[in-house]
Amino acid sequence: MEEEENILEKEKSQKNSRYSDITQIAACNVDRIFSRYIFPNQSISAEASRITGLTVVDSLNLFKQVVPGLASYSQSFLVNNLLGQEYESHNAVHDARLLLKLITDKGNIFNYLDDLAFSPNYPDQYHLQLCNLKTYSKEINEKVISKAMALKAAKSNLKLCHLKMSIDRGGKMGLKALLSEKSVKTGDARVTKNKKILQRIFEYFEKQ
């Protein structure tokens, strides 16, 4: 089957996309356009996203790889600077057409699909990451751990209780083994191997 690029855009009447009064959904490929206005009567759940089984690529991450070093990666900036066209906001059909032109003319999208595509399970994975991250709220506020480091731990499926458990079982070396475990895919530390960060976390739990 020949691969086909389908571009999806969404415009909403409120900033919170899960609770918009009116939402315009538009999609296009080279020769077809779809556009509908809908009135959502409930939030868009992670389960609804999972059931559709759609895979998407975020244009932000795509163009950061294709054209590194730009001052901005907003769609309006990309359209103005890469295509030399004016950007008309709040029109999903117009946005979809411009995004299609961006990725076909400038984006080399098929070279990056495997690396940048979100899996159908992404909504569930993202929800899990947020739940994991919330367990670090107190420690982030007390500057025991930075938000960036906590997010890295959350993405690797570690809650705060896992850090405490590693210390209870193996002391400082147990914490180090957990957080500095090498990724099979990249060879990088699971979270960190920085001695100062490890020491700060260890001392925090020792005082509890």
Image (cartoon, rainbow, N blue to C red):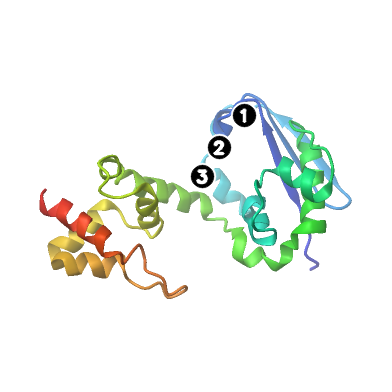
Contact between labelled residues 3 and 1, with CB atoms less than 8 Å apart: no
Left or right: residue 61 compared with residue 149: right
Look at the numbered discs 1 and 2 and tell me whether their residues touch, using CB distance below 8 Å.
Answer: yes
| Rendered image quadrant of residue 90 | top right
**Element at label 3:** helix
Q: Nearer the viewer, residue 41 or 183?
A: 183
Q: Locate the N terminus by quadrant.
A: bottom right
Q: Amino acid at mark 1?
A: Pro
**Could you tell me residue 198's position as x and y percent?**
24, 61
The residue that disc 3 covers is 46
Q: Earlier in the sequence, mark 1 or mark 3?
A: 1
To which residue does mark 1 refer?
40
Residue 10 visible in rendering: yes
What amino acid is labelled 3 in the image? Ala
Q: Position of residue 72 (x, y in %)?
A: 65, 46
Question: For residue 173, which quarter of the picture?
Answer: bottom left
> In the structure shown, which secondary structural element does the residue marked by tag 1 occupy?
loop
Inter-mark Cα distance, 2 to 3: 7 Å
Give the number of callouts: 3
Residue depicted at x 11% and y 54%: 206
Question: What residue do we see at 70% from left, 68% from top?
Answer: 111
Q: Dot 1 surroundings within 10 Å: few (below 14), some, or many (20 or more)?
A: few
Q: Which residue is mark 2?
A: 44
Is 54 left, or right, of 104 in this rendering? left
Dot label at residue 12:
none
